Image (cartoon, grey):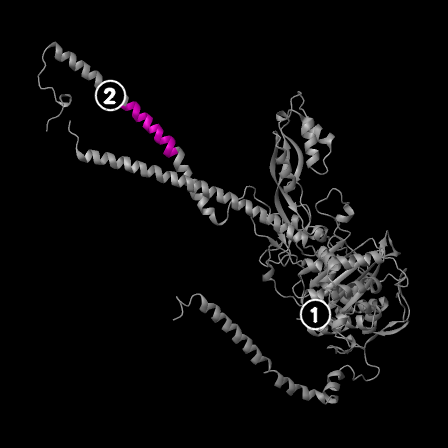
Amino acid sequence: MKIRISTIVTLMMAVGAGFVLFQTSQNVQRAEDRLHDVREALSKEQGTVRVLETEWDYLNRPDRIEDLARQHLKMSSPDLAALVKDGKNIPEPGHAVLPPRKPVLAATSPSLRQGGGASSAPAITPNNAQNLPMPSPVANDSRQQFNDLLNDLAGQEPSAGGAP
Amino acid sequence: MSLPPLFRRPSEKLIGARRSALDVARGRLVLMGVGFAALYMLVAARALDLTVIQGELPRLAHQQVRDNDLSAPEQEIALRADIVDRNGVLLARSLETASLIADPALIMEPEIVAKDIVRVLPGATYGDVLKKLQRQDKEGRKLRSVLIRRNLTPNDQYNILLLGHPGLGFRQEERRIYPQGALTSHIVGFVNVDGKGLSGIERSMDSILAPGRQPLQTTIDIRLQHIVRRELQKAIDDFDAIGGIGAIMDVNTGEILAAVSAPDFDPHEIKESDKEAQFNRLTLGVYEMGSTFKTFSIAAYLEMKNASMAQSFDARAPISVGRFKISDFHPENRFLTIPEIFMVSSNIGAARMGEAVGTAALKDFYRDIGLLDKVQIELDEVSKPLVPNPWRDLDTMVASYGHSVAVTPIQTLAAMSTIANGGIVVHPTLLMNDSLPDKNGRKKDGKAEIRVISAQTAHRMRQLLRLVVTEGTAKSADVAGFQVGGKTGTADKKEGRGYDENKRLSSFIGVFPMDAPRYAVMVMVDEPKGNKASYGFATGGWVAAPAVGRIITAMVPVLKFLA
């Protein structure tokens, strides 16, 4: 019987292929195990997140927050009286519907009175108009400063790569 | 190429007996070879079957299924969907919890184990645990699985594991948690041990809350809910009442931002709460609402008669119909104009207007604004209104000021929203998702706008509602700058066939801001008793109107109304 080189080569290739196959399958198995572990950990984390979210909303119950705020903060809920000096001064948009016994002009008068009586009223508007551009240069300045800051920050790091 | 002798083919020819003996031997060898080959083939085939066909292929198939799942990782127990408020705050969520189970057959010294468990688990008693660990079946054998405690906290579970006793194990179970507790108890409802909804949204939306679904978003705002509950409770405490309701509705969309029924209950401790507390007065309670109904009868009158506001009605003396007498709580004993009737809440005036509208027309109008039919809302606990049958002309007069027809508070609030928003019918809703079909299969967003009163009548009604707060019975509901309008109602409760003057329902429905209404706020207190601060009065103006005023004051910053 004659043994050819091709036979030996084929045998070696078969052994080699078998080894590579074994190696690959081992790798795949290991990767799968890791994937499984990661998935399990992920699911566990998600469970924990669910519990923590629930606890967060439980601890943020409005009545509890209210109690804590009362105990620890020197603040109170906004009082409308502090915002509106005299509610009666706010003009009523609707008109009185009681059939007028006396002619009542007062219902529509607040705006009238303001416009006619106050001489300062027209003075305020141009003032406002003059004031309006005032904030904008400041805003521009601060925007410029912000942009400069950004440029500075950007210039430190990627200047070698990005900026010429 | 010379090969070793072993491989060389025999060159000599064999003849005779030797040849035949060799032939036989060779034949046997071939036979054996074929036999072994066949056996090896069998082994190889079996190996292929075990490894590839039975082992690898299903695994590959399974792998593919798992790969498809990559975006949504698998969960051991499929959990019921969450219920959240309009801002995403959790109202109900299912969590996986561990229940402690024991295998008594594996526990050699139950006394020691019981002692350890009691030491670690708060609230466990030694005798109870020991009895469970020693439990036997009818034939005197130890059981293999006994439930010691449901739903351990993670900390307790950790401590049990630290004990290290064999025979103690855990079973994963699903537990429904309500982080807001009693605050939303009637709206959200509760589930039984098996996770089946028994009341509230948990019950009516049971199929939509199936495991794996998206969270169900309600229209409730938990901050407003808290404000309403706080102020309602204050009113109940101040006037020594037995209960009440409070609700906030968006008058344009019908979304319910807050819905409280007092007394309420802890949805985690259903067994300990009494049935009375589980009763949702807002949708299940049916009450004669009293004077708030004058809003609707006057709207009907203005719409149908196109009358002048200056028109006046005779309220000089009570009306007698048969043995029935209609009289005023604060008699003015004179002719009253329409705004005056509304402002001083004159029963006589309202009855005369109802009479002028007519029985059929008033009934139709009440039906149009949803007061005579069961209200369509995403809850199962909804009552049908009680409507007199037959409806006589006297009922028309009485119904004009809110008696003889008994309705749920939620549909009264919706009807008031309909009047306030300019005359478009409001359908109350508890769910944010507009695409969910309601029980009749209609889609909410496909609903046509139904106008029941003209814009002009609605405008006049808004003026009248505002007048009640600026000049009439509900001055204490005013909030500077927010133009609250509304209508008070004080109704004696029905006792048997008559009415009990000492048991009443005091309510107020406020709407604001009156120039372009956005929210309607309702408070109704059940059986309030007058106190010193109210000079003994327990009417809607004294009990409910201040509560609504406080609610509006508190809700304005929450809604960032000023911004």
**Relative image position of residue B145 (x, y in whole percent):** 63, 29
Secondary structure of the magenta portion, mostly?
Answer: helix
- Tell me the tag on residue B517: 1
Which element is circle 1 on? loop
Q: Is residue B246 above or below residue B266?
A: below
Amino acid type for the residue under numbered disc 1: Pro
Q: Residue furthest front?
A: A156
Q: In the image, is A123 to the left or to the right of B6?
A: right
Can residue B404 be seen at all in this image of the molecule? Answer: no
Question: Which residue occupies the foreground of this view, A53 or B430?
Answer: A53
Magenta residues span: B37-53
**Relative image position of residue B70 (x, y in whole percent):** 47, 48
Q: Is residue B360 above or below residue B122?
A: below
Q: Quadrant of residue B418?
A: bottom right
**How many residues crowd mark 2 within 10 Å: few (<14), some (14–19), many (20+)?**
few
Q: Is residue A60 magenta-colored? A: no
**How many residues crowd mark 1 within 10 Å: few (<14), some (14–19), many (20+)?**
many
Q: Is residue B46 magenta-colored? A: yes
Can you tell which of label 2 and label 1 is closer to the viewer?
Answer: 2
Tell me whether marks 2 and 1 sit on the same chain: yes
Q: In the image, is A73 to the left or to the right of B5?
A: right
Label 2: which residue? B33
Q: In the image, is A137 to the left or to the right of B117?
A: left
Distance of mark 2 from mark 1, alpha carbons?
A: 100 Å
Q: Quadrant of residue A160?
A: bottom left
Q: Is residue A38 above or below residue A126?
A: above
Amino acid type for the residue under numbered disc 2: Gly
Question: Which residue occupies the foreground of this view, B5 or B230?
Answer: B5
- Chain hosting mark 1: B
Question: Which residue occupies the foreground of this view, B136 or B331?
Answer: B136
